[in-house]
Amino acid sequence: MSLRNLTALAVMAAVSLACEDRERHADGPVIDDTGHPVSLVRSPTRIVSLAPGHTELLFAVGAGDRVVGRTRWCDHPPAVATIPSVGDGLNPNVESILARDPDLVVFYASASNEAAIARLEQLGIPTISLLTDDLDDLMRAADLLGTITGQKATSDSLIDWLSREIASLRASRPGGSLPTALMVAWDNPPIVIGNASFLSQIAELAGAHNAFADVDRPSLTVSMETIVERDADLILIASDSGIPAWAERPEWRVVPAVRDRRFVVVHGTEFSRPSFRAPAAIRRVRAALQEWHRR
Amino acid sequence: MTRWVGLLAAAAAALLLGVVVGPADLPLDAVWDGLLGRGDQATQAIVRDLRMPRALLAFFVGGSLAVTGAALQALVRNPLADPYLLGLSGGAGLGAVAAIVFQVGGVWAVPLAALGGALLAIALVYRLALVAGAVLDTRVLLLSGVVVGAFAASLMGAIIAISPAPEVRNALLWLLGGFDAASWRAFGVFTAYAAVPLLVIYRQNRPLDLLALGEEPASFLGADVERLKRVLYVAASLLTAAAVSVSGIIGFVGLVIPHAVRLLWGHLHRSLLPAAFLLGGVLLLVADAIARTAFAPLSLPVGVVTALIGVPVFVLLVRRWAK
Amino acid sequence: MGEVIFETKNVEYRYPGGPEVPAVAAVSLSIESGELVGIVGPNGSGKTTLLRLLLGTLRPDRGEALAFGRWATEWKRRELARRIGVVSQREEAAFPLRVRQAVLFGRYPHLGPLGAPSSVDWAAVDHALRRCDVAHLSDRWVATLSGGEWQRVRIARALAQEPRALALDEATASLDIRHEMEVFELTAELVREHRMAGVLVTHHVNLAARFVDRLVVMHRGAARASGPPAAVLSDAVLEEVFEWPVAMTQWEGVPQFVPLRRAVEGASGAVEGEQQRE
């Protein structure tokens, strides 16, 4: 056989093997957000989800009926209440997870989960680690989960929809200069939200500029005078408890936006993590900003 | 005499530093305007309502920690004693972490919880150290402090283990020390509260000298040793608890400053205590200035900076001693 | 002779958690100004406990222990420190101290918390340093002194208190002969010069006998004998108290005792005894 024919044969063999692979498995070789390939024999039917965002995502792509375990912090959609909790999502209790007899465990990508992941892998249970810190993470995760659970059609359409919504929101942002928004994660020591955070993304899309957008971190500890110096136009608060107690403290009242009570408050779990509820959330913030403008 | 002039000058310079330096890059003339109530509103607010009370608070807390360290070193006759050896840092930490994690409401929740935890630890350590009725055994005091501190720390660990990550990280950051909650009100409250124990400790400056000879000789030279131990312990503990509740756990000031002062001023507490107060204030002010500006806009916990300064200083002191 | 400085009336003391037998039982004595009294006895006889009762460090279970006419335990420590100077066996300063400063500590009972030592205070310090023959050591660090020198410095400190009584608690136990003699001489002189009441607790019976006006011999908590050395020291008393055979002799009119050796075996196997008592 000539070299050319040999090569052609090899290529064809490889292609047919690859096709066979794809037929044998419900999904292709999948790489998760920590770079590990996910080894799955068949489409999972008993999934344990270890992050509220992941749980929400699984339900969104139509695999909610296959979720048999969730964290105690999972709260959306309401149907999760009937699913047994396995405790914490970070550094979780492996026994509780095993008690649900899973064939896939979906982790939040974090170093504190490495021990649990190793343990489960040892026991032959496939795991997948996903990040869902912002909307790009969300779309990637949706794609992965949709592929794995055989719900690719649903996930594809959701991703399409979300991309269009984001584009539309971006295009329809109010013109002119945007107000600057301060987002506070903690009061003492003062921790503010930086650029690499979901809440910051929401604010930007809604039409407010993060006062700390120059810092490419999810959050950062700063001193009070830095906050005063940035002189944000408003303080965006995503909390169920409204205006926080620290707003009464003397050192916080030096911040002009606090002194003048320039608060914009929104509440709901859709602000604490990226999900397909994000466009609605962004619209709520936009409405709140417009309302604030009018005042 | 020149030592005192130098120290007072250093104190003035440090206070000035606290007002002039900061992550908000304010030029000198703007700071001057701000001090006098002229010019830009934001600058005025930063200089008068943030930097000034913060500088003063850091100074007073640093001074209080240094005086406490000196008094405790005399009380337990151990040069390695520091305000946190008596277990109250564990108690304060436990109180603060519990308040944060269980989301106890109220603006003063964390400081009050830290204070409460510290006071509980103090009471427990004191009770443990009371052997044979009324006598306070300082060796048992030290050991009890370590034990109570370890116990509180392990409880803290348990709370942390069962709590959601963000609150925990915030609680631990608070514990590492910082003056971000500084305001004129905080300064006023702390100073009013700290003045009494500080004066009480200073009033005992002569018995503190005598204590170095041993409890019995001190007693024969006129020190009411049992009362002295009680008074010192309570005053030192209250002072430290106040400092912790206002600014978290800031180490090394109480340990290192008394030694540094002894090198120049000797061991007699009549001059050691005021000098320690001033030098402790200077150290903490400088540390806070560094913590605020070194990585602007990011802000470091003050306790980290004092450790970074304190450890090499401590090594230097130990080497001097070994000679 | 003079005013009664120390006095006990049937005083009794039992250490908490100690044996049923009291450490000091029914001891009555009085010490006046101008007299030097020695308290001697074997270990555990109660001599240190008795001193502690006199100084108000311990509270009697029964009876009274008075200093300057009041219950010793009722005195404020500061007030008592202005009246009684105490020198104990051993003492270590936790930080480096110069001799002059160490003696200045003796003025502390007279100083307020804020005032600096006055010229009166320094005069008292310097006088005490000279009197105790340690003025030449004024600028030395205390840690560099010999045992005897440090002891004299502490006597100087006690003297600087300008007390009306001096108490020495086994103050010479670790000293060599020269320094021990110096301490005894100095103490006796100070007591006479200043008409102080002096009490010293010591193991060294023979030496004490040569310096003191009176001896109190303690035995199992009780004062077995009390009075001038010539009257108190006899073989009968000493053998009973120290549970050891002794021979008596004299030096300058003061009885001295010599503890006897055990009988030793001779080369021939016969038992040879010490020279028999006279």
Image (cartoon, rainbow, N blue to C red):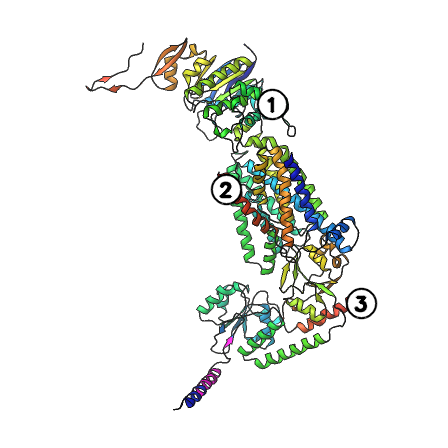
Label 1, on which residue? C122
A158 relative to B15, above or below: below
Q: Nearer the viewer, residue A103 or C103?
A: C103
Q: Mark 2 points at which residue?
A: B319
Q: What residue type is labelled 3?
A: Arg
Q: The residue tagged with tag 1: helix, strand or loop?
A: helix
Spatial separation of the CA atoms under disc 2 and disc 1: 35 Å
**From where the camera sits, is residue C196 visible?**
yes
Q: Quadrant of the C terminus of chain A?
A: bottom right
- Which numbered disc covers residue B201? none
Asked if the stretch drawn in magenta spans residue B78, the answer is no
Q: Residues within 10 Å of mark 3 (few under 14, many from 20)?
A: few
Residue type highlighted by circle 1: Trp
Q: Give the range drawn in magenta.
A: A12-30
Please state if B8 lies on the left or on the right of A41 as rendered. Answer: right
Whole-angstrom CA distance, mark 2 to mark 3, is 68 Å
